[in-house]
Image (cartoon, rainbow, N blue to C red):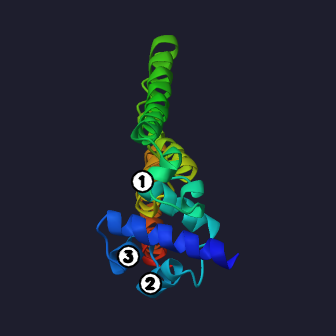
């Protein structure tokens, strides 16, 4: 087990240096301290599996790359091709665009068959799209900034949806809920792991 920690540490150090990052810069990106990064690279400790996965995504390699000794050329099979990442980005964009296509379909259907202009469906498409983005981020990227942005969009989109849906009720104070929710989200984003 100690040998595996050393191999992972050596590979993490090599990948970080290849990206021309300092330990402090890497620590900031992943919300850890530079001391934690140093311990990983020395093989004293290893990151948890979620962090290893996030590091692999960041460096464009697989877990196998980190756990096998040797040079980058020896482990070429374990390097994630750029096309994989690009496909994930396109798949995410496609999923979000489908949400908007469904909203447009609902709008047109109500307009044609019920002579009802329900433009609020586009407001509701915002938090639905943010939820899809959040789920795909969790599945593919696990990027904290993207979590922060998608949850922010969800919070304000949902509040706006409720406000517009019940505009005659005068529920504008509902937006006050957004401030503590956004503050909580921001503090979570800035928190070190």
Q: Earlier in the sequence, mark 1 or mark 2?
A: 2
Inter-mark Cα distance, 3 to 2: 7 Å
Between circles 1 and 2, the one closer to the viewer is 2
Residue at 66% from the left image edge and 79% from the top image edge: 2
The residue depicted at 48 percent of the width and 47 percent of the height is 76
Dot 3: element: helix
Q: Residues within 10 Å of mark 2 (few under 14, many from 20)?
A: some
> Would you say the residues marked 3 and 2 are in contact, meaning their CB atoms lie under 8 Å apart?
no
- Residue located 44% across and 84% down the image: 33
What is the CA distance from the residue labelled 3 to the residue labelled 1?
24 Å
**Residue 178 occupies which quadrant of the picture?**
bottom left
**Image quadrant for the N terminus?**
bottom right
Measured from the top left, where is residue 102 in percent x and y? 50, 26
Query: Where 102 sits versus 82, above or below?
Result: above
Residue 33's mark? 2
Q: Residue 60: x, y in percent?
A: 44, 52
The residue at which mark 1 appears reads as: 153
User: Which sits earlier in the primary sequence, circle 3 or circle 1?
Assistant: 3
Q: Which secondary structure lies at badge 1?
A: helix
């Amino acid at each position: 087990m100690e040998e595996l920690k050393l191999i992972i540490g050596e590979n993490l150090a090599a990948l970080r240096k290849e990206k021309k990052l300092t330990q402090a810069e890497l620590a900031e990106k992943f919300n850890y301290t530079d001391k934690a990064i140093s311990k990983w690279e020395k093989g004293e400790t290893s990151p948890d599996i979620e962090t290893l996965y996030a590091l692999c995504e960041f460096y464009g390699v697989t877990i196998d790359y980190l756990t096998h000794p040797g040079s980058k050329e020896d482990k070429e099979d374990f390097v994630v091709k750029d096309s994989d990442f690009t496909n994930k980005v396109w798949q995410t964009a496609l999923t979000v665009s489908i949400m908007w296509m469904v909203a447009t379909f609902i709008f047109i259907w109500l307009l044609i068959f019920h002579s009802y202009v329900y433009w609020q469906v586009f407001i509701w498409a915002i938090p639905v799209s943010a939820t899809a983005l959040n789920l795909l981020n969790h599945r593919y990227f696990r990027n904290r900034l993207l979590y922060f942005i998608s949850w922010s969009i969800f919070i304000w989109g949902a509040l706006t949806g409720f406000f517009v849906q019940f505009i005659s009720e005068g529920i504008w104070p509902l937006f006050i809920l957004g401030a503590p929710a956004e503050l909580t989200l921001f503090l979570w984003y800035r928190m070190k792991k």
